[in-house]
Amino acid sequence: MAITLTNFRATGLGNAPDTIHITDAGLVADTAQTGAQIVDCNGAYLSPGWCDLHVHVWHGGTDISVRASEAGRPTGVTAMADAGSAGEANFHGLREYIIEPHAETIRAFLNIGSIGLVACNRVSELIDDRSIDIDRTFAVIEANRDVICGVKVRASQVIVGAWGVAPAKIAKRVAEIAGLPLMVHVGEPGPLIDEVFDILTPGDIVTHCFNGKRAGSIRDTAALFAQAKRMAENGILMDIGHGQASFDFKTARDSVADGLLPYSISTDLHLRNIKGPVHDLATTMSKLLSVGVPFDECIAAVTQRPRDVLGLDSVKCASPGIRADFTVFDLAETEVIATDSSGNSLALNQMFEPRLTVIGTSVEPSARRGQ
């Protein structure tokens, strides 16, 4: 059935019309369709569908992944990228059982480690040089270019041990040859964060950019923070990747105050943080709003920017002929005490509240899990 969306406040949609018409084929139309279902948004905001650039949804394929539905439409998210749950050895399962069946748009960063996150942090995917098969990795990329959006490497001591920065360098070379961006997880050394920064080029993504880890944070020294700002100005993408251990209120607040805004806001959602401290994308957005990221920047950081990485055009979301993909949400007054990954607390006065998502002609209510 055709749909007409009415009574909304457009944000992130450019010069969107006052009403949006969707044909029974799921495409945005320039005129009302006969017999269309009227969807009253009750004065809520309407944006391009929210996109979470860092989730783990290879449920059953790793010991940490949530179901894609838990990271998706019930939380206001219509597009997401699995960030390295699968390597070349098990990517076929992620594609067949997760990416293809779901209504949400799902892309993936391919882990440079062949086994991915099968037993996350219990069995490292980067024990030594036997953990990477470059030829098989290239073969998987070439066979799945329609869904692989980049290469992922976890460059921190608990993963690489004494191997240091070498896996990140290998991942970067593979990504360069394949013409893809590299997403690099930064955390506890080694390697040192500046060793990782030195190999990155425009379009690459630093996830966990506001972590508070000693000797693994952009706030460790003034020189490191200045380097991070230069990188962001030069096109290297700073991604939140909240996670279980990778987001710190003070690091975020100080960085934003000093002029470094995140490119994208993402959750790093998985089984060990879905019940807290992360919960969902709306809660993560609310935390960034509370530490000083402006409303419009928060919306861009979950719509236009991450959608660009996935090859989804948010600028034309409300244009005729484009498949409908929207999130309807409110910004509600609240009194919630939120926590970061370090156990610090912060009072939130406003909370993003997803109301419904629209994908094609499918309209589904959303419900934030929250605190």
Image (cartoon, helix red, strand yellow):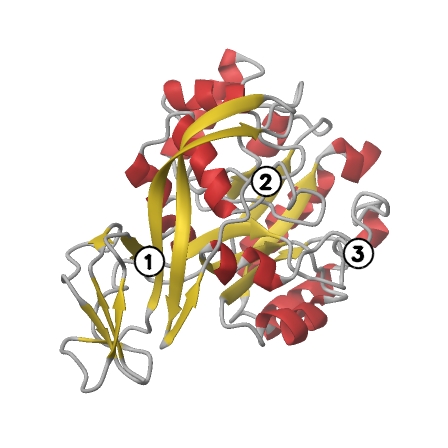
Residue 176, horizontal then vertical, whole percent? 55, 53
Determine the CA span between mark 1 and mark 2. 22 Å
Q: Residue at image x 14%, y 61%?
A: 18
Residue 336, horizontal then vertical, whole percent? 49, 31
Q: Which residue is mark 2?
A: 278
User: Which numbered disc flags the more N-terminal residue, 1 or 2?
Assistant: 1
Determine the CA span between mark 3 and mark 2. 21 Å
Amino acid identity at mark 1: Pro
Determine the CA span between mark 1 and mark 3. 33 Å
User: Which numbered disc flags the more N-terminal residue, 1 or 3?
Assistant: 1
Mark 3 and mark 2 residues within 8 Å of each other at the beta carbon: no
* 129 vs 318, nearest the viewer: 318
Secondary structure of the residue carrying tag 2 is loop
Amino acid identity at mark 2: Val
Q: Residue at image x 13%, y 78%?
A: 31
**Where 185 sits versus 256, above or below?**
below
User: In which quadrant of the rendered view does residue 221 lie?
Assistant: top right
Residue 100, horizontal then vertical, whole percent? 58, 75
Residue 43, horizontal then vertical, whole percent? 23, 53
